[in-house]
Amino acid sequence: MKKIIDCIFGAFFLFICGLAFADTWPRVFFQDHSFVAIFPNGDSGYRFAASGGAVGKGSSAGADCTIQSDLSLTEGHRYSGQIRPADNSLHSFSDKNVKGKIVDVNLLESSIEIISVDVFGLCSLNSSISGVYKEIPISSSKYANALNFFMNASLESAGGFFNKGKNEMAADELSPYVLGLGDSGLILRFPIFLKLANDFGYYKQLAGDHDSAISAFENVLSISPGRIVTYLNLADSLWQVGKFDRAREEYKKYFDLMGSAGKAGKIPDRVKLRM
């Protein structure tokens, strides 16, 4: 009986969180077999992501086209931006590939219209993702599937950039998702946001931007204090900016948590030296 009550309460909490934070959550739109998501990205911009557009059947069918863009407001309800580079199992676009490739959209109250998008040379010739997409509710399974699809694609692209030594590009790929940490309802339904924000901090750390890294790590730990490795990451960045007393505190937390988890043998030597 208690389990049933707990489940009902959990579902009710998700529903209430959805109502309370719907205005700040990413928005998802569908059209036939294509879908679009927009993630808040700054004061008046969005990270735009679209996938689909396969046309035809059998051997003549085009593959789905998946793109992202950082959109800025141009006028009225109209936004535009250049297609972003990508490095994942779906596509590999370099800076050179996407130069001058523009997405132009009209964002309305319950729909989004992709007015024009230049995917020539990026996607198959018979791919088409233009047109009007209708918004779907955040309670929909399609909503969750679309968000998870795009976030995992970004996570993979960030890893691809990291493997090529492009740490700043890797961090930039994940930057919109850090904003999601301010919404407890969003984190409850999509815990992947914590992974994205933690990796953002790590890539910022590698790029030498320790202030941004520290902020990201602190946000992650405020929501998920059990993420042991984040204490190490936070301590390392604090040490790099000369905040040695605070760094020692975080190293000690990491040391104790690793010991409690039976992983004392995996603690890096620098932790003991700096404590």
Image (spheres, rainbow, N blue to C red):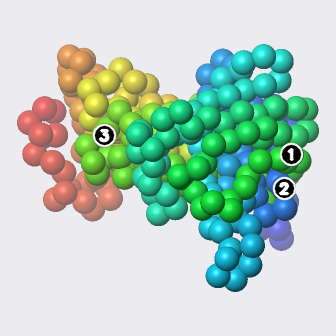
Q: Residue at 53% of width from left, 52% of height from top?
A: 121
Which mark sits nearer the N-terminus, 2 or 3? Answer: 2
Residue 93 vs residue 215, the one in the foreground: 93
Task: Specify whether 22 is left or right of 197.
Answer: right
Which secondary structure lies at badge 1? strand
| Location of mark 1 (residue) | 132
Task: Specify whether 62 is left or right of 6.
Answer: left
Q: Residue at 61% of width from left, 22% of height from top?
A: 42
Label 3 environment density (alpha carbons within 10 Å; few <14, some 14–19, many ≥20): some
| Location of mark 2 (residue) | 31
- Whole-angstrom CA distance, mark 2 to mark 1, is 7 Å
The amino acid pointed to by label 2 is: Gln
Q: Which quadrant of the rendered structure holds the C terminus?
A: top left
Q: Residue at 63% of width from left, 43% of height from top?
A: 118
The amino acid pointed to by label 3 is: Lys
Task: Specify whether 199 is left or right of 162.
Answer: right
Residue 63 vs residue 170, the one in the foreground: 63
**How far from the left and from the top, in percent, is residue 272?**
12, 40
Q: Quick check: marks 2 and 3 in contact, CB under 8 Å? A: no
Which mark sits nearer the N-terminus, 3 or 1? Answer: 1
Location of residue 247 by image quarter: top left
Which secondary structure lies at badge 3? loop
Residue, far bottom: 58
Residue 93 vs residue 111, the one in the foreground: 93
Q: Residue at 48% of width from left, 35% of height from top?
A: 99
Q: Which quadrant of the rendered structure holds the N terminus?
A: bottom right
**How far from the left and from the top, in percent, is residue 253?**
31, 39
Location of residue 209 by image quarter: top left
| Location of mark 3 (residue) | 166
- Whole-angstrom CA distance, mark 3 to mark 1, is 35 Å
